[in-house]
Image (spheres, rainbow, N blue to C red):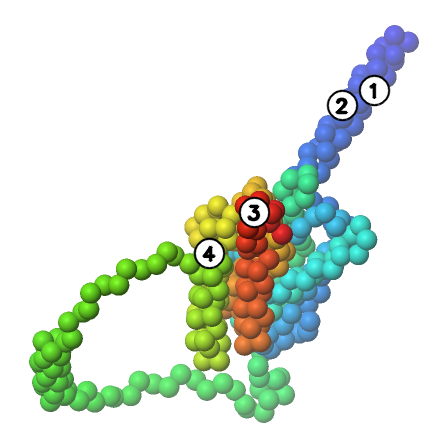
Amino acid sequence: MNGRVRTFRAAGVVAALLWASGTFATDAGTVATAKPLSITQSVEPRTVHLGEPFTRTVTVTHARGERWELHLPAEWGDFELLGQERRRNDSGDTATTVFTLKMSAFELGQRTLPALQFEVTSAEGVRSYSSDTATVEVAPTIRDADAKNGQDLYDIRPPEPLPVPSYALIWALLAAAAVAALVYAAYRWWKRPRPAAEVPQGPPLPLDQRTRKMLDELRAERLPAQGRIKEFYSRLTDIIRGYVGERFGVEALDLTTTELITALRDVPAPGLPREDFARLLEQADLVKFARAEMTPDDCARALDFAYLLVDRTTPPPAPANGNEPPLR
């Protein structure tokens, strides 16, 4: 009888230890990993041809106090990212954030899309979440029926002889042109007008006026109409980062987008539309680093937002009595 009692007691202790270890493991996982209310993803179309674009959509329903950010991987393997869009809709105590990735594939067969990594920021701190993988079927550009009828890709052509002409006369003409250009440049330098005495400059313009002047100059260059979208976003974000850094005392030009958004949480930034500002920086990163496609209308909206950000964060002028009102 005593042996059975000892056996039951030992079994009870083992069961209690197993239950406690499972509970602690669950708690530790909960602290490190975010839990959305629901998450779904889809791939459209499910079957694409080689190099044809398709869309991967991830919809996350989460608490309103959370902000979900997608961390793009450095390498996509057999895939290429063509563009990304992030939309958020708040409703009551919950919010829905939709991530849309435009992609293409360059390997045939059923391909597995990698899991996506998210950073979740809330009052509880920063947590992470990893989505499930997804699949897409990549078909060849030549249909089976055409292949059976003898239609196929052309094979690589053999090398052909290429005569190499002599460029001696061209080099001689270029050398003569270079000498003539140097002589003309020396003549112009000798005949140059002498600089007038420097006029003393007045005090520098206020920060908001300097920033608006740079935005006006960027608008006047009409870079989007010339197809220079990447150059436009690079110039725009440099201007607005410099303004935000000088206005709120952060090293905005030396930080990544995520580091800058995190740094702004620790400083008072009255009037700053944080969500829209973060969205502008994310959009610019996609254009500069992921070759995302933006239209001139997208560029115009981004420039209008830059003017709006300066207006909202510029302190009003001090009244005549010297009592400075608070920032709006």
Three-letter amino acid code of the residue under disc 2 = Leu
What amino acid type is highlighted by mark number 1? Gly
Judge whether 123 appears above or below 138 on screen: above
Residue 29 drawn at (x, y percent):
69, 37
Percent coordinates x, y for residue 51 in the rendering? 55, 75
Check the picture and name the quadrant holding the N terminus. top right
Q: Residues within 10 Å of mark 3 (few under 14, many from 20)?
A: few
Q: Amino acid at mark 3?
A: Asn
**Residue type highlighted by circle 4:** Leu
- The answer to which image quadrant residue 178 occupies is bottom left
Q: Say whether disc 1 or disc 4 marks the residue closer to the N-terminus.
A: 1
In the rendered structure, which disc, 4 or 2, sits on the residue that comes first in sequence?
2
Name the residue carrying label 4.
207
Determine the CA span between mark 4 and mark 3. 23 Å
Q: Write down the residue under mark 2.
A: 17
Residue 233 shows in the view:
yes
The secondary structure type at the circle numbered 2 is helix
Q: Nearer the viewer, mark 4 or mark 3?
A: 3
- Left or right: where does residue 231 sit relative to residue 99? left
Residues marked 2 and 3 touching at CB (< 8 Å): no
- Label 1, label 3: how far apart the Cα atoms are: 80 Å
User: Residue beneath label 3, please?
Assistant: 321
Mark 1 and mark 2: Cα distance apart in space: 9 Å
Tell me, for residue 12, which label it has, or none: 1
Q: Residues within 10 Å of mark 4 (few under 14, many from 20)?
A: some
- Quick one: which residue is furthest to the top in this view? 2
